[in-house]
Amino acid sequence: MAGPAMARAAAPGYAQSAIDPNGAAGAYCKQTGGEVQRRVPQYGQSSNPLVLSGSHDFCRYKSKSDGSRIYVFIDTLYTTQPSLAALAYYAEVQPGTCQGNPAACYCTLLGGSDTFGSLGGAGGGWAFGRGEDPLLEACIFPDLSSIDSWGLTYHSQGIVRGIDLSTVLKYPDPYAKTRHGKTLPTPYEKAPKAD
C-alpha cells in the first residue's frame, strides 16, 4: 500500500543522519577511539521535556587523562569534504562578547545555533538519557554539520576536550600549513622527523 502515510514513514526525520552508525562512519568513530551515541532533540529541561522528531548519531570522544569529552556528528567526522563545523574547529576564531551561556554565544557568533526555542526560553538539547552529558549543547551549522558548543569554545582557547579533532576528522585542516608561521602536517601526512 503506497500513499502519503507510506512516504512519511519512509522519509527520515528532519535531523536524521543519512549515515548508518553501524556502517563505515560508525566503525571509523570506534576505530579512532570514539563511541557512537544516537541522540534525540529535546525541548525543555524540566522533568517532562518534549522529545522532538528525528535523531542524529554523534561520535563521543573521552580523554583518558582528564575525562573531558567532545561530540561530533558522525557524518561531520567522516566526510572528506569541508563542513562549516570542521572549518570552525580548525579556524580557532576567538570568542566575542555577549550575554548568557558562553558556549551558546560562541556557537551563534560562528553562525551556528544550539538554541531550542527563543533565547531565555525553556532550553533543550540533544538527549541521550543515560551516562555522562545526558543533554548536549550541539552547535548545528546551516550545512547541518555539528560539533558540540563547549568543545568548539574550549578549542578556540587552545584547550582540547576529549580528543584533538584534527587528528580524526577526515577533512584535513586547511589552515595547518600556515598556522602560527610554521609548516605543520595534516592528519594524512607524516610529521617530519626530529633532528
Image (cartoon, rainbow, N blue to C red):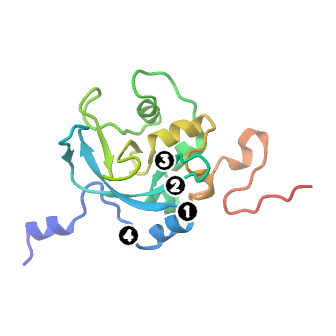
Left or right of 99? Residue 186 is right
- Front tag of 2 and 3: 2
Residue at 43 percent of width and 51 percent of height: 145
> Dot 2: within a 10 Å radius of its alpha carbon, few (fewer than 14), some, or many (20 or more) residues?
many
Q: Earlier in the sequence, mark 4 or mark 1?
A: 4
What amino acid is labelled 4 in the image?
A: Asp
Q: 96 or 162: nearer the eye?
A: 162
Residue at 56 percent of width and 57 percent of height: 169
Residue at the far bottom in the pictured view: 1
What amino acid is labelled 3 in the image?
A: Ala
Q: Give the CA separation, mark 2 to mark 1.
A: 7 Å
Give the quarter of the image for residue 58.
bottom left
Cβ–Cβ below 8 Å for labels 4 and 1?
no
Q: Which residue is mark 2?
A: 61
Q: Give the CA separation, mark 2 to mark 3.
A: 16 Å
- Front tag of 4 and 1: 1
Give SS at disc 2: strand
What amino acid is labelled 2 in the image?
A: Tyr
Q: Earlier in the sequence, mark 3 or mark 1?
A: 1
Q: Which residue is mark 3?
A: 85
Q: Which residue is mark 1?
A: 33
Residue at the far right in the pictured view: 195
Identify whether 40 is placed above or below 94: below
Q: Give the CA separation, mark 4 to mark 3.
A: 20 Å
Residue 148: image x %, image y %?
45, 45
Q: Which residue is mark 4?
A: 20
Cβ–Cβ below 8 Å for labels 2 and 1?
yes
